[in-house]
Image: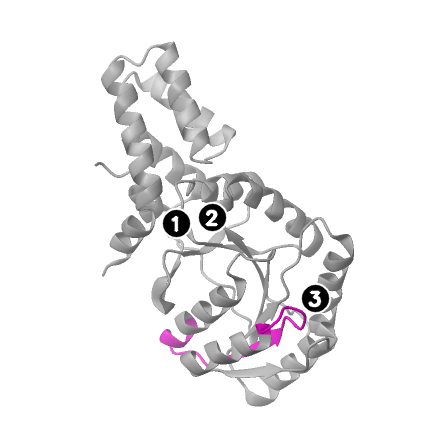
Amino acid sequence: MNLFQKFRDGLRKTQQKLSAEIKRIITRSPKLDPDALDELEATLIAADLGVGMATQIVARVREAGTPDVLAIARQEIERELGVATRELIKAPRPPTVVLLAGVNGTGKTTSTAKLAHYLKEQGNTVLLAACDTFRAAAIEQLKIWGQRTSCEVVAGQYGADSAALAFDAVGAALSRQVDYLLIDTAGRLHTKMNLMEEMKKMRRSVEKRLAGAPHEVLLVVDGTTGTNALNQAREFHQALGVTGLVVSKLDGTAKGGIVVAIARELKIPVKFIGLGEQLDDLQPFDPQQFAAALFAEG
């Protein structure tokens, strides 16, 4: 299956809802009078594209004087997000350390495993660190993913100091000379300051062990949560300096536009999106393919 088809299949719920609503509006008002344009804007906001992006698209439709809303929406999203694929940062010398963060239930551990699979498919060696020492069965879950992806896992005991474990994991990655170290962290509410401080401590611990690390801080957000994902991204970015986003579960939502809203407001590149349950369903984000799939005909 090619990349566009994966995007198309994963975004089908969002695309079908958008396409149906836009066609209904155009059919009722081919010349797109002011009421129709207001309804169009509400439809785009309902898909969680964000008020700014929705207003931008409607303004362009008004200027163009054409009912080809889908084509204009594709163009505006491409222009806003750029056309280049967002590559993972790679350290000058291995290992590249990637810290994955997020609130509970976003699919962070699964996304960590899928990222490991993707990197191994690119010919890299990968070490996983189970730094979620709080959630029941979290360590075992990552160990199972390690077996499925043929990756070694650095793990400690439940209740262990996650910052110390992350420090040791970087040491293990250095001694084993792996290309990437992926650190899975405990899910935490972005509103709980003590937990966010603990995440900052983990980041400092990693940096103390290896200058310049972590090279990536990826925030995993659940696409089905819509605008709440934007609030999470805002708080985590302020606390940790997020370098990229992984948007999971886009195949199960009609609110796939949240990808655009987050990237537009926070200027953080979306690096990967989750489009299904299989290991290879985590795909590098491509704005062109995303826009084409989100506003496809039919």
**Are the residues tagged 3 and 2 within 8 Å (C-beta)?**
no
Image: 63 above or below 82: above
Does the stretch in magenta take in 126?
A: yes
Does the stretch in magenta take in 123?
A: yes
Q: Which disc is residue 223 wearing? A: 2
Q: Could you tell me residue 57's position as x and y percent?
A: 40, 27
Q: Circle 1 is placed at which residue position? A: 252
Using the numbered discs, state the Cα–Cα distance from disc 3 to disc 1 in whole angstroms: 32 Å
> Circle 3: is it few (<14), some (14-19), or many (20+) Cα within 10 Å?
some
Disc nearer the start of the sequence (3/1): 3
Would you say 31 lies left or right of 207 here?
left
- Per the rendered image, the range of residues in magenta is 119-138
In the structure shown, which secondary structural element does the residue marked by tag 3 occupy? Answer: helix
Using the numbered discs, state the Cα–Cα distance from disc 3 to disc 2 in whole angstroms: 25 Å
Q: Nearer the viewer, residue 191 or 134?
A: 134
Q: Nearer the viewer, residue 87 or 6?
A: 6
Q: Nearer the viewer, mark 3 or mark 2?
A: 2
Q: Circle 3 is placed at which residue position? A: 203
Using the numbered discs, state the Cα–Cα distance from disc 2 to disc 1 in whole angstroms: 8 Å
